[in-house]
Image: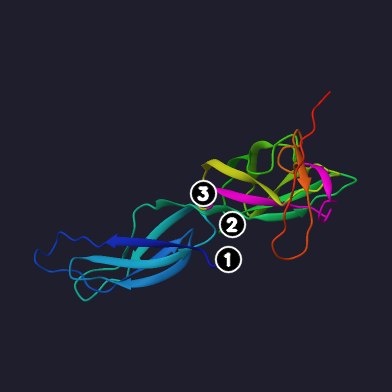
């Protein structure tokens, strides 16, 4: 991958020549690999913007080139930098079946591979789609092994035999370890294949315990008359 951005700063210090500031440059290394070089400024600092890959724990060292007044030198010990990738979930669309359950796969990805194990918790939440009625709720913890950048959450969408408008539910992410959540929730949309319902009485697509009256007419202004009859 291209790596994740990081700002590195090295201070070149000297105590043998008061009033004389070091010049020259500093090379920066991550896990022994050269990241780049930066010039020492008038305050004795060298700053480098670098892309670190993979994400996770990086061992940073620096070496000073020296100049006419000062010898070259290396850092006496390494500094540990932890680079955290972002975690996001993608929206999904699934077509509901009239004969069997189908699976909605929601993909969760990292912005960059990491050398650490990354975990994040997930849970579905109702929208216009209702748990146990339109889909089966799920929750748990996703684990990304070192080097892994993508995984999926499978949600069972229940079959139906009545007309329904498109419905949706969400997948929420929380409590990430060694990663940062950039997209806290994704939406799964459930489409129906039934088409429009027939004229007459039909189960309400949002509340099957209620009955709707389906009426079709020509374009324009139609008069609809409803006659009440007494229940015996």
Distance from disc 2 to disc 3, alpha carbons, whole Å, reads 15 Å
Location of the N terminus by quadrant is bottom right
Which scheme is used to colour this image of the protein?
rainbow
Which residue is farthest right? Answer: 99
Mark 2 crowdedness (10 Å alpha carbons): few <14, some 14-19, many ≥20:
many
Relative to 168, 43 lies left or right: left
Q: Residues within 10 Å of mark 1 (few under 14, many from 20)?
A: few
> Can you give x and y, in whole percent of width and height, for residue 218 in the image?
77, 63
Magenta span includes 188: yes
**Callout 3: few (<14), some (14-19), or many (20+) C-alpha neighbours within 10 Å?**
some
Which region of the structure is painted magenta? 183-203
Going from N to C along the chain, the mark reached first, 2 or 3, is: 2
* Side (left or right) of 78 relative to 134: left
Residue 1 got which mark?
Answer: 1
Q: In percent of the image, x 46 and y 60: which residue is there?
A: 30
Secondary structure under badge 3? strand
Q: Badge 2 is on which residue?
A: 113
Q: CA distance from mark 1 to mark 2?
A: 7 Å
Q: Nearer the viewer, mark 2 or mark 3?
A: 3
Q: Disc 2 vs disc 3: Cβ atoms closer than 8 Å?
A: no
The answer to whether any part of residue 82 appears in the image is: yes
Any mark on residue 181, and which? 3
């Amino acid at each position: 991958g291209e790596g994740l951005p990081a700002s590195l700063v090295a201070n070149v210090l000297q105590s043998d020549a008061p009033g004389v500031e070091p010049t020259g440059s500093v090379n920066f290394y991550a896990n022994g690999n050269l990241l780049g070089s930066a010039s020492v400024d008038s305050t004795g600092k060298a700053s480098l913007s670098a892309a670190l890959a993979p994400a996770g724990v990086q061992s940073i060292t620096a070496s000073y080139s020296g100049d006419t007044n000062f010898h070259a030198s290396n850092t006496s010990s390494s500094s540990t930098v932890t680079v955290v990738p972002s975690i996001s979930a993608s929206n999904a669309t699934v077509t509901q079946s009239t004969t069997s359950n189908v699976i909605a796969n929601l993909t969760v990805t990292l912005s960059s591979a990491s050398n650490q194990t990354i975990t994040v918790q997930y849970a579905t939440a109702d929208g216009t789609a209702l748990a146990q009625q339109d889909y089966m709720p799920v929750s748990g913890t996703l684990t990304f092994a070192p080097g892994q950048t993508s995984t999926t959450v499978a949600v069972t969408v229940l079959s139906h035999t009545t007309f329904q408008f498109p419905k949706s539910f969400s997948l929420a992410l929380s409590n990430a370890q060694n990663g940062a959540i950039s997209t806290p929730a994704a939406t799964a949309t459930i489409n129906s294949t039934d088409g429009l319902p027939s004229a007459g009485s039909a189960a309400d697509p949002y509340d099957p315990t209620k009955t709707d009256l389906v009426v079709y007419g020509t374009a324009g202004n139609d008069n609809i008359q409803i006659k009440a009859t007494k229940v015996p």
